[in-house]
Amino acid sequence: MGTDRYGRDVLSTVLYGARTTLLVGLVAVGIALLIGTPLGIIAGMRRRWLDEMIMRASDVMLAFPALLVAVVFGAVFGASTTTAMLAIGIGSIPGFARVARSGTLQVMSTEYIQAAKSSAQTRFAIARRHVVPNISGMVIVQCSVAFAIAVLAEAALSFLGLGTPPPVPSWGRMLQDSQSLLGVSPMLAVWPGVAIAVAVLGFNLLGDGLRDRFDPKLNHSRTSQSTSSQVRP
């Protein structure tokens, strides 16, 4: 792969940049998971004014693209890895809240939840014993999709100079550094671009696989298809 304009080995820089990008994605998804999921569960279980307030706040946040929120954070608080983590994480909260709320509403409409309420179980006990285990599949899928978005957002922020500052390697920073050398050495931009594409595609495919694994409707339809194919003469 050669070296970049600073004499650094490109392969080593790409590998170290993966560490930075994946760390930002991991922390950002963790922030969104720990804040958005409880909010979604609360909205799905309480309904009425609390549900309305959480969902309207989520709508307001969704009205602004997550990348735009991250750019504003970077411009206000300065370029840093921590700022990128917080900005991407906060921008991902509405997605987790909506997924958790949707799953909670489905669980709360089942008969065993009505039985749990009849046995005088508290809302916290119902959420811990019944809601969280049943929506965990949806949340895991959302984590995979959000991770892919976080990788792309971190690369975009670093490319704009609002993410991970130099000299820490980052895929987006590598793209920015190679911009002025495209006519001389275009491969300097190819390798970080390929790394970003592979990471985003990989996490999206992982999300599709997890969705197939955790979605009972898909599993039931596939089981029915396989059974019918075996019955045919």
Image (tube, grey):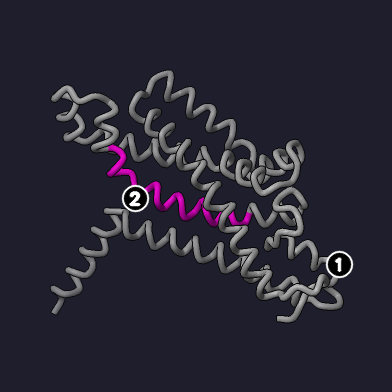
Q: Is residue 133 magenta?
A: yes
Local crowd at mark 1 within 10 Å, few (<14), some, or many (≥20)? few
Measured Cα–Cα span from mark 1 to mark 2:
45 Å
Q: Is residue 171 left or right of residue 89?
A: right
Please report the residue visible at 70 percent of the width from the left and 53 percent of the height from the top.
Answer: 164
Look at label 2 and name its amino acid.
Gly
**Position of 159 relative to 232 (above/below):** above
Q: Residue 180 got which mark?
A: 1
Residue 155 on image: x %, y %: 67, 57
Q: Which quadrant of the structure image shows residue 127?
A: top left
Q: Is residue 137 left or right of residue 224?
A: right
Is residue 205 left or right of 164 when viewed as pictured?
A: left
Magenta range is 131-152
Asked whether the residues under the numbered discs 1 and 2 touch, taking CB atoms below 8 Å apart as contact, a structural biologist would say no
Query: SS at mark 1?
Result: helix
* Disc ID at residue 110: none
Q: Earlier in the sequence, mark 1 or mark 2?
A: 2
| Residue at the spot 26% in from the left edge and 64% down from the top edge | 222
Image x and y of residue 158, in percent: 72, 54
The x and y percentages for residue 111 are 17, 34
Q: Position of residue 183 (x, y in %)?
A: 86, 75
> Which is more toward the observer, 187 or 11?
11
Q: Looking at the image, which residue is at 57% across and 55% down?
A: 23
* Image quadrant assignment for residue 201: bottom right
| 109 relative to 206, above or below | above
Q: Is residue 153 above or below residue 105?
A: below
Give the amino acid type for the residue marked by disc 1 in the picture.
Ser
Query: Label 2 belongs to which residue?
Result: 137
Query: From the image, which quarter does the C terminus lie in?
Result: bottom left
